[in-house]
Image (spheres, helix red, strand yellow):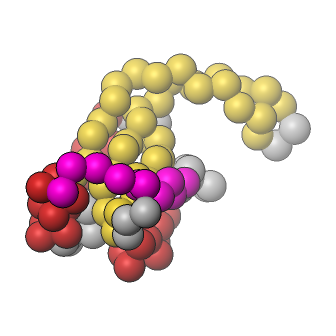
């Protein structure tokens, strides 16, 4: 197990996704953020089943930055309750994991 995390979030627009990604990388909260365009989300919100086109953010960071990443997402996001799910990275290439660490 490593101290590296993949944090998943979604955004309602490309510009919002880019703003979040840029801020996280600029402030060294993330080594990299992938933006996956135009995913179709189906979810329950306030008792109703909703659908939306969203942008998925795949954020590479470390455990020590998790709360800062969460706080930044909440601050920058237009959603009342933005997604912020952290998945621990079990393993990866040593060189890539070191690059993540060095980029933060």
Instruction: Identify the residue shown where x is 38% and y is 79%.
Output: 64
Instruction: Identify the residue shown where x is 30% and y is 36%.
Output: 35
3 with respect to 83 (left or right): left
Q: Where is the N terminus found, in terms of image quarters?
A: bottom left
87 with respect to 68 (left or right): right
Can the viewer see residue 40? yes
Instruction: Identify the residue shown where x is 71% and y is 27%.
Output: 50
In this picture, is 36 found above or below 28? above
Q: Position of residue 47 (x, y in %)?
A: 87, 38
Can the viewer see residue 19? no
- The verdict on residue 28 being magenta is no
- Which quadrant would residue 5 be assigned to in this image? bottom left
* Total residue callouts: 0
95 with respect to 45 (left or right): left
In this picture, is 32 found above or below 44? below
Residue closest to the far right: 47
Q: Where is the C terminus found, in terms of image quarters?
A: bottom left
Q: Position of residue 89 (x, y in %)?
A: 41, 55
Residue closest to the far bottom: 64
- Which quadrant would residue 25 be assigned to in this image? bottom left
Q: Position of residue 27 (x, y in %)?
A: 20, 71
Depth check: 33 or 71 in front? 33
In this picture, is 64 found above or below 53? below
Q: Which residues are magenta?
A: 85-94
- Which quadrant would residue 98 be assigned to in this image? bottom left
């Amino acid at each position: 197990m490593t101290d590296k995390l993949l944090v998943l979030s979604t955004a309602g627009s490309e510009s919002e996704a880019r703003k979040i990604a840029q801020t996280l990388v600029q402030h060294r909260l993330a080594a990299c953020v992938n933006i996956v365009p135009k995913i179709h989300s189906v979810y329950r919100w306030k008792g109703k089943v909703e659908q939306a086109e969203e942008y998925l953010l795949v954020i590479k960071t470390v455990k020590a930055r998790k709360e800062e990443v969460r706080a930044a997402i909440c601050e920058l996001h237009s959603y009342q309750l933005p997604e912020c799910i952290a998945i621990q990275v079990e393993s990866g290439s040593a060189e890539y994991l070191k690059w993540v660490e060095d980029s933060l």
